[in-house]
Amino acid sequence: MTIIASRKNRLSSRRNVVATLLFGAAAPAMLIGCSRAAPSYDSTDITGATFAKDFGLQDHQGKLRTMADFRGKIVVVFFGFTQCPDVCPTSMTTMAEVKRLLGDQGKLLQVIFITVDPERDTLPLLMAYMQNFDPTFLALRPEPDQLKALADEFKVYYKRVEGKTPTSYSMDHSAGKYIFDPEGRVRLFSSYGKEATVIAKDIQTLLASK
């Protein structure tokens, strides 16, 4: 009986060793098979960027805003100015269409317009400008002495272009959009001219990947 038991123990031990080796070999394959594929975006993926982290600016209602105010939402930040003849209204119209395309998910979108022309863009003017596109969109106004540091933080270009009179100047500026995830981290850069359907798809992918 002792000999039979011993043999059984040896056989059981061998089976356990074989099972352990087989499982060990299969485990990496199982992990690979179960891992989620990295999401694919049409916009430029800038996840992990060390710029465009935050701001502290008045909105068009006079309330101080930071990125923390919009946790839980996708935030799209665009720099422009109200007297911009084409790029700015086109971009804002595109974002209004993006919100429409998102349907119920549109309530998870916050569009933010930051003026690069604080000298002319007063809070009442910015409020009226937002009403042209969507009443939920927010305009933020840096003080003139805040603008350079803010532009540097967001890697945004702007330059005043003088006109025929002191008040008829224009502003050259970057025209892309920064897209932040619901945790307030900058994730995507959408260049000017992207269609609303493309931006909406990227936002849906970002929401699904959180």
Image: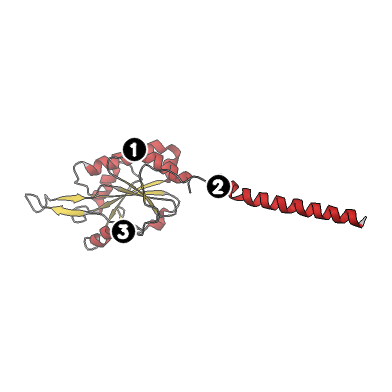
94 and 202: which one is in front? 202
Q: Where is residue 134? Give x, y as percent.
A: 33, 42
Q: Which residue is mark 1?
A: 196
Could you tell me the amino acid type at mark 1?
Answer: Ala
Task: From the image, tell me which residue sits under label 3.
Answer: 57
Residue occupied by mark 2: 32
- Along the viewing direction, whichever of 6 and 75 lies nearer the viewer: 6
Q: Is residue 132 visible?
A: no
Q: Left or right of 61: which side holds 47?
A: right
Residue 11 percent coordinates (x, y) = 80, 52
- Residue at 20% x, 41% y is 86
Q: Nearer the viewer, residue 205 or 97?
A: 205
Distance between the alpha carbons at the discs numbered 2 and 1: 35 Å
* Total numbered labels placed on residues in the image: 3
Q: Are marks 3 and 1 in contact (CB under 8 Å)?
A: no
Q: Secondary structure at mark 3?
A: strand
